[in-house]
Image (cartoon, coloured by chain):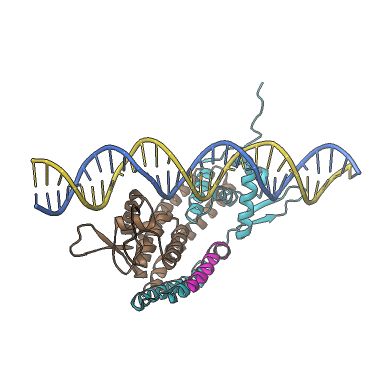
Chain colours: A cyan, B brown, C yellow, D blue
Amino acid sequence: MPELEESGSVPVAGLSDLERQIVDFFVDGVRVLGMPGSVGEIYGLLFISRDPLSLDDLVQRLGISKGSASQGLRTLRGLGAVKEAEVPGMRRAHFEAAVDLKRLAGGFIREQVRPHLESGQLKVGRLFEAVAAEEDRESREFYDERVAKLEGWMKRARMMLPLMQKVLGQ
Amino acid sequence: MPELEESGSVPVAGLSDLERQIVDFFVDGVRVLGMPGSVGEIYGLLFISRDPLSLDDLVQRLGISKGSASQGLRTLRGLGAVKEAEVPGMRRAHFEAAVDLKRLAGGFIREQVRPHLESGQLKVGRLFEAVAAEEDRESREFYDERVAKLEGWMKRARMMLPLMQKVLGQ
DNA sequence: AGGATCGTTCAATCAAAAATGAACAATCGC
DNA sequence: GCGATTGTTCATTTTTGATTGAACGATCCT
């Protein structure tokens, strides 16, 4: 007597070929962006799902722990990459992927890029102070030039952001 | 009787306050870009050094292994982020930081970004094939729409590259 | 050629990050 | 209120990736 059976044409666990490929695609993608693979798995599966999925669906289909699923969903909600969907008659929360690139890029910039740029700016300020403490004039001038260059780089990096938003947004 | 002494006003090992801050700055920077911290240490120290440094200088000053220094320098040379400098009368190779942002960004794009975009494009091709294998018409249409969206995202990502080069270059 | 110097490679080690899962907290339905 | 269901947290385990350092090969110098 079998302990469990597949319950229908929709796989309860395990992924179809297409789903597997999509999930892997996003795992690579989020890894490039410096995020854990499970976040990519979750977003990938939601992206290719016609219907919203619950946390438990994700756990079952992807074979990940509840902890990872919960934490991954939190990250994705922070980025604005998943939305909670109302599924009538269902108690559990269900989620679907946000697929508006402008919104996705905006969330990523806000959560992951801006904080780094801002802390970088602070550090450059402190660097100028450290340079001012240098005794030797020639050294100080060299250091000052380098830190100024760094400041310029940071400025250009900040210029990139609105430009990215523009290209990606619509 | 002391075993060793500092040999002058230039620290043989250990970093000045400014050097430490610069090195940390670049460690964070390269980590954001998904590279090992030692690469940032090396680039940082070269960036703030008036004179070119040898591999052994980097090992001594940063307190890292020869292996890390060698591998880090290889990475940085691959990016075009360090140049070999001719130091007359010195047998060892000496290196200095390349500080042209356009060149740096170009190297990063060539080495780290393009490969991902290209493999992504291949994968999207395979995704369209997987979609075509879907039996159910409604599902297939949904999948097709999603993969087409992905293709669009990849296209926009590729559009970003020359734009980045333009903003960063000069 | 032969000893010395220098840089690279790679198997082993170590550290950082991610994933797990059990305990807990919150919410629901009755 | 009470039991059942659902989601979160966090200490532990596991995995991944970086770092080390000894061995090796290449190059230089006389």
Q: Position of residue B4 (x, y in %)?
A: 33, 54
Q: Quadrant of residue D13?
A: top right
| Magenta segment main secondary structure | helix
Tell me, yes or no, if residue A90 can be seen here: no
Residue B118, placed above or below residue A110: above
Tell me, yes or no, if residue A121 can be seen here: yes
Closest to the observer: C13 or A107? Answer: C13
Q: How many marks?
A: 0
**A101 left or right of D29?**
right
Q: Position of residue B17 (x, y in %)?
A: 44, 66
**B13 left or right of A117?**
left
Question: Which residue is at 60% across, 48% downward?
Answer: A49
Residue D30, placed above or below residue B11: above
Please identify the quadrant where the N terminus of chain A is shown: top right
Question: Which residue is at 65% across, 29% downward?
Answer: A5
Residue A108, placed above or below residue A55: below
Question: Which residue is at 34% across, 70% downward?
Answer: B100
| Residue A114 lies in the magenta-colored region | yes
Closest to the observer: D5 or A111? Answer: A111
Closest to the observer: C2 or A122? Answer: C2
| Residue A88 lies in the magenta-colored region | no
Q: Which region is colored magenta?
A: A106-126
Q: Residue furthest top?
A: A1
Closest to the observer: B168 or B5? Answer: B5
Q: Position of residue B56 (x, y in %)?
A: 30, 55
Q: Position of residue C26 (x, y in %)?
A: 78, 51
Q: Quadrant of residue A150?
A: bottom left
Question: Which residue is at 41% across, 73% downward?
Answer: A147
